[in-house]
Image (tube, coloured by chain):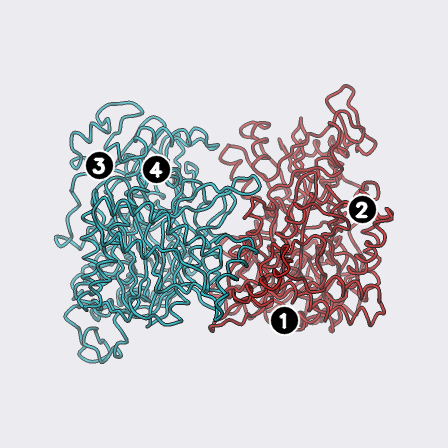
Chain colours: A red, B cyan
């Protein structure tokens, strides 16, 4: 899944388009607000926010603030956030996943990206201004026009990364305003009884069969890194939810799509302190954690709310605390004296987790066979049902989830399924709803980006784009160039420790050649029953170098606003490459096992090497998925798989009957095998 | 020229080999010191440094220092430094261009890279330890073992970039040592009368015909950027020597290979202050600068030594000073209060200078025709003389300089010529000397990396690798893969504003495919009669995005230690690309005009597109250089050029006589033009 995290990770440069066809101008439409008429027009979907705004401004007044910023994340810089943390949604009415709200005494403004402009106009009342921009710069520019010199801007420091705090603080400071850290969240103060309760579902341990190492082994590994570190850290502080989940092989359900629970960990050289609500652990889980004993391999479970106090107390000693700045909130960061901090972009847990051991790799391969069965069942089902006109984007996504649900160990989707037909596929992050969706048609391209979470240790993510009718020549060309990008990056041989950034252009070259491109990143790491977007692996400048045992998605695309969209995404394992001359070289092994759509491939654009690679990949799909379909007696799906993985042959020659022979000879002359 | 700047720009990862064949072990050799015997053995080339060390330690004692660091740069972070600034050479005896010396009261140590290990063992006496490492980390690690907690390490802050100061300061601080800024250079205090005099050659203005814009236009352009800047700078402070030279179209000769003069500029919204020795300007030049008048377009020439005082005085006002941190010394940086600084990696002059206007582009094209004539004359001369056994690396380089010297407007080499035969070519930065060089032979590869400075506004840099006999199959394969890399990057089409880092792997792919690579960067910007290595253009992560009008070298290579080396370097202009679908895309136009060595090309490795590109390039060389050779009545060179730019044809077909026809038909079938 192409991932946009507008603030800290500019994955998507810009995707401006609209989701539901060419709409009327906004002031003629009934589904969106119109604040330019008197009285303003509000659709039924709009939320009256007057009461909450008044209450929040009262708090701002008490704290002597001219402005208050309400961001869209939680205290762990999570990609998906729980209901309990949806402060921005509650104060604005707008429920989209990305968007920052800023209040002054006179104005209320929301900044969000093009995916959400229509949704914001539907959900917000006229208390709110919508700013169609992203990033901190436009917010700061706006603030400087709205609040006077000397004014104070308040934020909850636990909802800001260190970087994002510093960019606001610096910009305000040079303009003689002040950013103020207010550790009590002002929205929470006024949210009151409407606020969803703190999650209380059990926190559970994974079965040992489904984990790569025991938590004791992982703790020992991290401590060994601490001992080897030149600056001699005495502790590692973990803030990202997947860090704690990974370290202890624990999971929960506090966050949608991610099996995490609210937590922090302070791992010292002699103790392990896990901050989470103790009542959520069963006695078996507490026993599993050696909780209650003392010693360096006993986990002391402390209450989640005690983290600030405990970290501050620990930091008062003769200690050095090692943190990853990407996921540590400014709220925790400001509690630790600078000289007691060791700052890396990513914590040692984040970096260690990025490389999967052989057991984890085996679990992954198995999960991808199962996941391919579900996706193939869905593609077969679509092929039969779309021509009947009975499938829409939403019912399709439900059907897919049904098929995935029939796979052993399935525990839910790894993100909201992107099931997009026709012009909706041009929106890289479009998801249909029960109310708003488009019918699938044999005349349109359909883009499906989806994945599953599996108890036995893996998360999947795969995108296929299909067309059941007669695609245009341009659609075929664009699809084939996207496919070439996927193939060329997947088969690239590169030196060990190359950064993804240095090689991702191989996924774009075939598009660039003719003046086409895509506006999102080319891939992201993926977890073991953890995040579907797992940093720090991937192809962006903030990612770490590629190493054997890492997994990344490879997902070039092409999007034509208002027309169609294409994305082809596979998950690939970084493996050693065999080269003619000796050296430590790497390449990718694709582990996703779903055929591409032959109907959209223009074989004449593929080089002989690309064709050979593709046919080898199809052979692997046959070998791995075929027997599983047969074992499950999915005969129709098995036949479909055979048809869709028939070896593709080079472009048929033109008119003369001699031509095929000539082609073959010439390819041989050119040293190609056909 | 592949550029190593070990400290701040890790261009070359590692090139470990030796220059003069497989030597005896060091303790059997007479050309290097042997400090392990008693009494130590010192060759005649070694310098006795006891007196200067004693004097410097006395200064350290006065300043209460446990250690003193003597780096290898000047106050402008120059790549090449003048005699006047060769402090490290004077204190150590070692004259290599890269190397940092550190003194404690008991020890004296030098850190340098593999290019210089032998030279250091020849030139240093046994007062000095040689550390075969680079970067700040090994120096810091050593310091921590040599000096106690609480100790003070002194440095001249004008010889440290901001980043390098901060990395030393932070590492020492966390280990409870202190880095101390001592604005008076302690080496200078003890150098005394032995020190070369301050350069006093005239500073002169370029003819207007040879400049892209007048200095007044350039000043207006920078001021306009200041006015548009959100943080409202009141001044730009320029520290790099080429910034001042570029801004005023002035040149000097204080630095080898670079036509610069010691200078700083403080360009404010209402004044222009040029810090340089006033006595070096003629009255015409002072008039050219409007010196003596008052007003925003009058240049006030102040003494070079006044820069600190003047900047400090200016910074005491209500001002904002915009700097590029890459070239500003910590010495100037620490004089300006943080809140009055606007810090970018590169100053607006550095970034503006990177894009050449059409007049500059025209001058460049003309200079490359002239430069190609000189290089081609040399290649022809080599072809005749090498088989006689009368040419060595050094005499060859001299002959080349003679040919370049016969070109109109030539003003000297743009760097020390790399003229390397056989195993010496494996050293990316090897240069022969009068004393130490290898004979050129028809049995060995010869690598020539050289360039000229031309008064009429350009600097050139070109590398060709040749073999006059029978190269091995591996040499041909390696050469051809390097050539493919050069071609594939040169013909790449990429979106505007793509960073060089994202595309440089196209120059490596053909090598990576078989497990080969090279350890240096892929290219660097180049100036208009300025630096041969002109930041911030190029293919490294610290370079800025590619834009139309930039020039960069493209120079993949391959080096086999102890055997041979290959590099193919061209200068290329970034131009707009025409694409099938509309969009703002860029590509490169190669402006170097010297044919590659056919004797080393394995045509069978080239794709049809690569071959087509190469033949088109050869056609351009013929069209541009041919007439110039004829005009100069260089008939032998003209014939050589015709022979060496004959179109190359695809690999000859196998046995049957029909084959050529089949090849052509098949290429036509595949849509290729032949």
Q: Is residue B229 left or right of residue A36?
A: left
Circle 3 Cα neighbour tier, 10 Å, few/some/many (<14 / 14–19 / ≥20): some
Q: Chain of mark 2?
A: A
Pointer 3 and pointer 1: residues touching (CB < 8 Å)?
no
Q: Is residue A233 left or right of residue A72?
A: left
Q: Quadrant of the N terminus of chain B?
A: bottom left
Q: Is residue A294 visible?
A: no
Kindly report the distance in space between the C-alpha atoms of the residues bearing marks 2 and 3. Answer: 77 Å
Residue A165 versus residue A553 in the image, above or below? above
Name the residue that disc number 2 marks. A440
**Disc ID at residue A357:** 1
Kindly report the distance in space between the C-alpha atoms of the residues bearing marks 3 and 1. Answer: 64 Å
Q: Chain of mark 4?
A: B
Q: Is residue A170 visible?
A: yes
Circle 4 Cα neighbour tier, 10 Å, few/some/many (<14 / 14–19 / ≥20): many
Q: Is disc 2 in the same subunit as disc 4?
A: no
Name the residue that disc number 3 marks. B303
How many labels, in total?
4
**Disc ID at residue B204:** none
Circle 1 Cα neighbour tier, 10 Å, few/some/many (<14 / 14–19 / ≥20): some
Furthest residue to the top?
Answer: A38
Kindly report the distance in space between the C-alpha atoms of the residues bearing marks 4 and 3. Answer: 15 Å
Q: Is disc 1 in the same subunit as disc 4?
A: no
Name the residue that disc number 4 marks. B237
Q: Tell me the element at label 2.
A: loop
């Amino acid at each position: 899944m192409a991932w946009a995290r507008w603030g800290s990770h500019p994955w998507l440069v810009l995707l401006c388009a609209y989701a539901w066809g060419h709409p009327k101008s906004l002031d003629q439409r009934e589904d969106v607000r119109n604040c330019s008429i008197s009285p303003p027009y509000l659709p039924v979907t709009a939320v009256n926010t007057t009461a909450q705004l008044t209450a929040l401004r009262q708090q701002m007044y008490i704290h002597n603030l001219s402005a208050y910023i309400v961001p869209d994340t939680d205290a762990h810089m999570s990609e998906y956030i729980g209901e309990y943390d949806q402060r921005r949604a509650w104060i604005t009415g707008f429920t989209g996943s990305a968007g920052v709200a800023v209040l002054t005494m006179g104005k209320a403004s929301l900044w969000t990206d093009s995916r959400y402009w229509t949704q914001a106009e539907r959900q917000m009342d006229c208390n709110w201004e919508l700013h169609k921009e992203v990033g901190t710069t436009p917010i700061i520019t706006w603030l400087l026009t709205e609040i006077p010199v000397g004014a104070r801007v308040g934020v909850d420091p636990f909802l800001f990364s260190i970087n994002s705090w510093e960019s606001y603080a610096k910009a305000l400071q040079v303009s003689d305003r002040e950013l103020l850290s207010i550790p009590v969240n002002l929205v929470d103060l006024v949210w009151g009884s409407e606020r969803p309760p703190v999650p209380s579902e059990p926190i559970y341990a994974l079965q040992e069969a489904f984990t790569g190492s025991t938590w004791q082994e992982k703790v020992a590994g991290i401590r060994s890194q601490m001992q080897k570190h030149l600056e001699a850290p005495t502790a590692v502080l973990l803030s990202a939810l997947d860090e704690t989940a990974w370290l202890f092989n624990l999971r929960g359900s506090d966050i949608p799509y991610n099996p995490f629970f609210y937590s922090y960990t302070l791992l010292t050289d002699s103790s392990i302190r896990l901050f989470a609500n103790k009542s959520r652990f069963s006695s078996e889980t507490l026993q599993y954690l050696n909780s209650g004993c003392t010693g360096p391999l006993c986990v002391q479970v402390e209450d989640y709310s005690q983290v600030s106090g405990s970290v501050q107390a620990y930091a008062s000693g003769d200690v050095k605390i090692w943190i990853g700045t990407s996921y540590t909130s400014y709220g925790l960061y400001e509690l630790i004296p600078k000289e007691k901090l060791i700052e890396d972009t990513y914590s040692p847990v984040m970096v260690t987790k990025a490389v999967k051991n052989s057991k984890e790799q085996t679990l992954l391969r198995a999960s991808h066979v199962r996941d391919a069965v579900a996706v193939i069942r869905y593609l077969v089902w679509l092929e039969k049902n779309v021509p009947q006109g009975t499938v829409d984007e939403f019912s399709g996504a439900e059907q897919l989830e049904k098929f995935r649900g029939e796979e052993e160990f399935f525990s839910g989707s790894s993100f909201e399924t992107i099931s997009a037909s026709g012009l909706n596929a041009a929106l890289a992050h479009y998801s249909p709803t029960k109310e708003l969706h488009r019918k699938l048609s044999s005349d349109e391209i359909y883009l499906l980006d989806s994945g599953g979470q599996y108890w036995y240790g893996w998360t999947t993510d795969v995108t296929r784009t299909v067309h059941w009718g007669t695609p245009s020549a341009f659609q075929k060309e664009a699809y084939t160039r996207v496919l070439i990008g996927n193939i060329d990056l997947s088969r690239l041989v590169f030196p060990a420790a190359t950064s993804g950034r240095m090689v991702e252009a191989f996924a774009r070259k075939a598009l660039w050649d003719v003046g086409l491109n895509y506006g999102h990143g080319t891939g992201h790491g993926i977890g073991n029953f953890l995040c579907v977007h797992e940093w720090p692996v991937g192809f962006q400048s903030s990612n770490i170098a590629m190493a054997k045992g890492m997994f990344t998605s490879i997902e070039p695309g092409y999007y034509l606003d208002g027309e169609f969209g294409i994305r082809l995404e596979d998950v690939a394992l970084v493996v050693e490459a065999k080269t003619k001359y000796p050296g430590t070289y790497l390449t990718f092994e694709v582990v996703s096992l779903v055929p591409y759509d032959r109907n959209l491939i223009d074989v004449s654009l593929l080089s002989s090497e690309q064709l050979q690679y593709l046919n080898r990949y199809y052979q692997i799909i046959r070998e791995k998925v075929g027997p599983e379909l047969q074992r499950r007696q999915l005969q129709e799906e098995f036949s479909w798989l055979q048809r869709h993985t028939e070896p593709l042959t080079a472009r048929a020659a033109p008119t003369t009957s001699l031509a095929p022979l000539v082609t073959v000879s010439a390819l041989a002359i050119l040293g190609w095998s056909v």
